[in-house]
Amino acid sequence: MNDLHEMAANSREAAWTLAASSLETRNAALLRMAETLENHQADIFAANAADIHQAEADGLAAPLLLSLIHISEPTRH
């Protein structure tokens, strides 16, 4: 199984585990996920900017390109 398929399978398994957990556990997990996203925000936006640059170079259809831009730069339209 390749990495992407393995990550998807792990995510599905984790989702079922989380769904069966207590409210306290789910809330703690959500807070941890939010904290992790905030801590890695710069890296996430940098990777998205690189994706946008590559998509522009590859001639990605405008609606798809705009959705990438909206994720990275919500005020740019």
Image: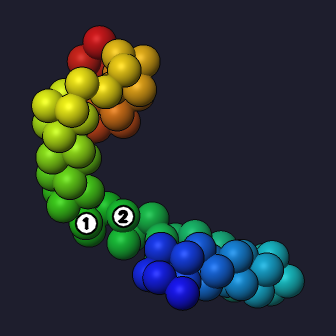
- Label 2, on which residue? 37
Percent across and percent down for residue 53 are 14, 36
Instruction: Between residue 67 and residue 57, name the one nearer to us.
Output: 57
Q: Position of residue 54 (x, y in %)?
A: 17, 40
Q: Residue at x 15, y 46 (%)?
A: 50
Residue 29 in sight here: no
Disc 2, SS: helix
Marking on residue 62? none
For label 1, the residue is 40
Residue type at numbered disc 2:
Leu
Q: Residue sitting at 24 percent across and 24 percent down?
A: 59
Residue 37: x and y, percent? 36, 64
Residue 34 occupies which quadrant of the picture? Answer: bottom left
- Using the rendered view, name the quadrant where residue 27 is placed: bottom right
Q: Are marks 1 and 2 in contact (CB under 8 Å)?
A: yes
Residue 18 left/right relative to 75: right
Task: Report the side of 46 relative to 76 (left or right).
Answer: left
Crowding around mark 1 (Cα neighbors within 10 Å: few <14, some 14 to 19, many 20+) is few
Q: From the viewer's perspective, tell me whether residue 8 is left or right of residue 51.
A: right
Which residue shows up at 61% across the image and 84% down it? 10
Q: Which quarter of the rendering shows the N terminus?
A: bottom right
Give above or below for 58 relative to 3.
above
Q: Residue at x 26, y 57 (%)?
A: 44
